[in-house]
Amino acid sequence: MTELKEGQKAPFFEGKDQNGNLIKLDDFKGKKLVLYFYPKDNTPGCTDEACNLRDNYNSLISKGFDVLGISPDSEKSHQQFAGKHNLTFPLISDPDKKILSDYGAWGEKKMYGKSFMGVLRTTFIINEEGIIEKIVKKVDTKKHAEQIYKLYE
């Protein structure tokens, strides 16, 4: 599994969002990108996280950030999730888990004493030049935007 560190160049990625648009890392040059990896559309924690980022989206934009979510769910699932919760930012579908793997966000998890492979909820803040500035591994799904702001205080 890839273990990215702050200060490293962010791995290139491209994928389709909920509307079928091709989104690439290069699209965010000149902006800070909140790149968040989450396990599954319409689950409680993932919904809390997405809605918190949605509720703070204008504030994030005004502070120079853009937002992009990635999970293994299909474009159709993302479309329904984004529509249901009025999400205004793109959600990339990564069913092959290539982007997840490149960012170290796919790996072994443990629950109830059992091990399985899954999405490791992680957020990367990528700066204007494509360098990983901050990594959040312990995401507070209900207050994620606030967590991001505190990294820059």
Image (cartoon, rainbow, N blue to C red):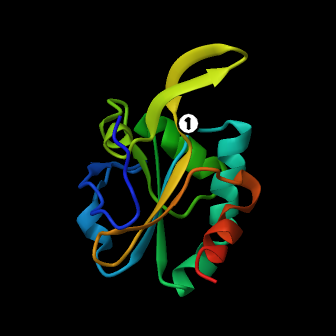
Image quadrant where one finds the N terminus: top left
Residue drawn at x 37%, y 31% as measured from the top left: 95
- Residue drawn at x 30%, y 36% as measured from the top left: 98
Q: Is residue 76 left or right of residue 110?
A: left
| Apparent side of residue 28 relative to residue 77 in the rendered image (left or right) | left
* Left or right of 76, for residue 83: right
Question: Residue at the spot x=31%, y=43% of the render?
Answer: 102
Question: Where does the image place residue 88, in percent across and percent down from the top left?
Answer: 54, 64
Tag 1 residue: 39
Q: Is residue 89 above or below residue 109?
A: below
Dividing the picture into quarters, in which one does residue 56 lie? bottom right
Side of 118 where 26 appears, left or right: left
Residue in view at x 63 percent, y 13 percent: 114
**Residue 138 visible in the shown view:** yes
Can the viewer see residue 72?
no
Mark 1 residue type = Pro
Front residue of 30 and 108: 108
Q: Residue 113 location in percent, x, y?
A: 69, 14
Task: Please determine whether, in this image, residue 114 is positioned above or below residue 85.
Answer: above
